[in-house]
Image (cartoon, rainbow, N blue to C red):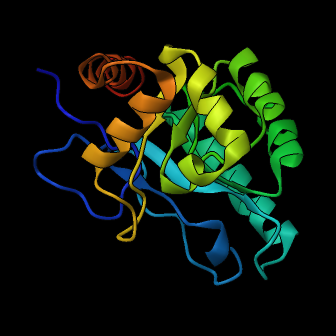
Amino acid sequence: MPQFIDIHTHNPRPDVLSPTMAGVHPWDAERGVALPELSAADIIGETGLDFVCDVSREAQEQLFRQHLEAAERLNKPVVLHVVRSFERVMSILNGYNLAGVIFHGFVGSLYQAQRCVERGYYLSFGARSIRSPRTREVIATLPHHLLFIETDDALSPSIEELYVAIAELRKEDVEELKKQLLENYNRLIIKR
C-alpha cells in the first residue's frame, strides 16, 4: 500500500513522505536573510510573491529570481507561495527552465489552474483549498499527474483527512489517490 505524501508541511512525520525544502520565504525578503545552502534540498522554496503582505514587491521579486536561478542551476523543482500575484509569477516563470513547479496551497480559479496545467505545473491542495468553492472545482477536475496534497501548518487537518476529503471531491478511492501521488512524487523528486 503506498504511503501518504505531504508535499509541503511544517510538521514532518516519520510515517509520511515529505520532501526537504530550502529557501527564504517572500515575507522575509527585506530582512537581509541570505539564501541557505540549497543543493541538499529536494525542492527550492517556498518562494514566490505575496502582494498582500507588507514587504516591497521589488525585494520579493529579487529574492524570487535568486531562487529560480538556483533551482535552474541545480535542476531542482520549486514550491511557490503565490498570493494575489498569479499573473506576475507566471510572467517571471517564463524566463526559466525549471525541473518542476508546484503552486502550494492553491486557492485559485479554474482559468488559473488551466494555465498551470498547460505548462505542466503541479498544484498542491490543503485545507484552505478545500474550503474555496472555486478551487473545489479545480480539485475535482485537475489531471492526476499534476496533483499534490499538503498540510502546510499545524492548524490543518491531518494528511489522512485531507486525502479523504480530496478523494471525495474527485469521486475516487483514497488508495488510488495515494498511488497516483506517490507516482507524481517519484517522477518529480526522485527521478529527476
Q: Residue 188 or 169: which is nearer the viewer?
A: 169
> Residue at position x 88%, y 38% from top?
91
In screen coordinates, is 156 left or right of 94?
left
The percent position of residue 30, horizontal first and vertical second, equals: 71, 80
Task: Indicate the quadrant where residue 173 lies.
Answer: top left
In screen coordinates, is 134 left or right of 57?
left
> Residue at position x 57%, y 15% from top?
143
Task: Indicate the quadrant where residue 113 lies.
Answer: top right
Camera sees residue 123: yes
> Residue at position x 30%, y 47% from top?
161
In screen coordinates, is 129 left or right of 108?
left
The percent position of residue 61, horizontal first and vertical second, equals: 79, 59
Camera sees residue 42: no
Is 181 located above or below residue 68 in the figure?
above
The percent position of residue 87, horizontal first and vertical second, equals: 88, 43
> Residue at position x 64%, y 84% from top?
31
Which quarter of the rendering shows the C terminus?
top left
Q: Residue 75 or 51: which is nearer the viewer?
A: 51
In screen coordinates, is 91 left or right of 101?
right
Which quarter of the rendering shows the N terminus?
top left
Q: Residue 6 or 109: which is nearer the viewer?
A: 109
